[in-house]
């Protein structure tokens, strides 16, 4: 009897820990690819943006919904097509201004996804009031320091951190 309690307790802990790790792993490659794209836009490198958008499309297409927690899965169902379409649009364009315009939509949806996921590291939600034709736009970063993907070196530090996820 005592053995059964210990066995099932250990089994529960292993299952819970494994499930938690899977949740992080499932979204981690998407976030890493997104950050690569953001960095390409910061560098105003449209060719690198195409390559990293391709990696993002691949990562988004590989998300296994069985690995997601309920909140993340519900969000994924609502926004996955928009994420994939925005990434494909960036992938298909060599025009940095078009890529940056699509990055607005991509970032809005990535925020929703990352907010529901359990992050191993802090993710910073940043905002530039001048982006998006003066309407303002957000993006995600793994750095607290602002590096603006909408203007690159022209206004690299324009913006602020508005939330830490």
Image (tube, rainbow, N blue to C red):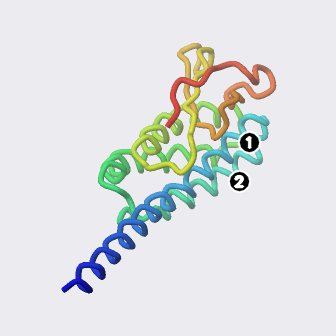
State the residue in front, 163 or 154.
Answer: 163
State the residue in front, 30 or 55.
Answer: 30
Tags 1 and 2 in contact by the CB under 8 Å rule? yes
> 38 left or right of 81?
right
Q: Secondary structure at mark 2?
A: helix
Mark pair 1, 2: CA separation: 9 Å
Look at the picture and state if 78 lies above or below 153.
below
Residue for point 37% across, 62% down: 65
At which x and y percent is residue 156? 76, 24
> 137 left or right of 152?
left
The residue at the far left in this view is: 1
- Look at the image and tell me whether residue 27 can be seen: yes
Residue for point 44% across, 50% down: 118
> 33 left or right of 135?
right
Q: Secondary structure at mark 1?
A: helix
Residue for point 58% across, 13% down: 134
Which badge, 1 or 2, comes first in the chain's sequence? 1
At which x and y percent is residue 21? 47, 63
Residue for point 51% across, 28% down: 163
The residue at the far front in this view is: 2
Give the image quarter of residue 17: bottom left
Specify the label residue 40 is tagged with.
1
Specify the label residue 51 is tagged with.
2
At which x and y percent is residue 61? 49, 61
State the residue in front, 76 or 54.
Answer: 76
At which x and y percent is residue 53? 63, 50
């Amino acid at each position: 009897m005592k053995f059964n309690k210990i066995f099932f307790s250990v089994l529960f802990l292993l299952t819970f820990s494994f499930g938690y790790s899977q949740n992080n792993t499932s979204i981690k490659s998407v976030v890493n690819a997104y950050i690569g794209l953001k960095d390409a836009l910061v560098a105003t490198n449209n060719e690198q943006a195409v390559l990293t958008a391709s990696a993002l499309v691949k990562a988004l297409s590989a998300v296994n919904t069985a690995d997601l927690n309920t909140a993340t899965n519900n969000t994924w169902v609502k926004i996955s097509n928009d994420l994939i379409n925005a990434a494909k649009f960036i992938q298909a364009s060599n025009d940095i201004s078009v890529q940056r315009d699509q990055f607005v939509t991509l970032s809005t949806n990535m925020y929703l996804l990352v907010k529901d996921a359990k992050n191993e590291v802090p993710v910073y939600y940043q905002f530039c009031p001048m982006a998006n034709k003066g309407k303002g736009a957000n993006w995600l970063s793994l750095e607290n320091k602002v590096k603006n993907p909408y203007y690159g070196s022209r206004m690299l530090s324009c913006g602020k951190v508005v939330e830490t996820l």
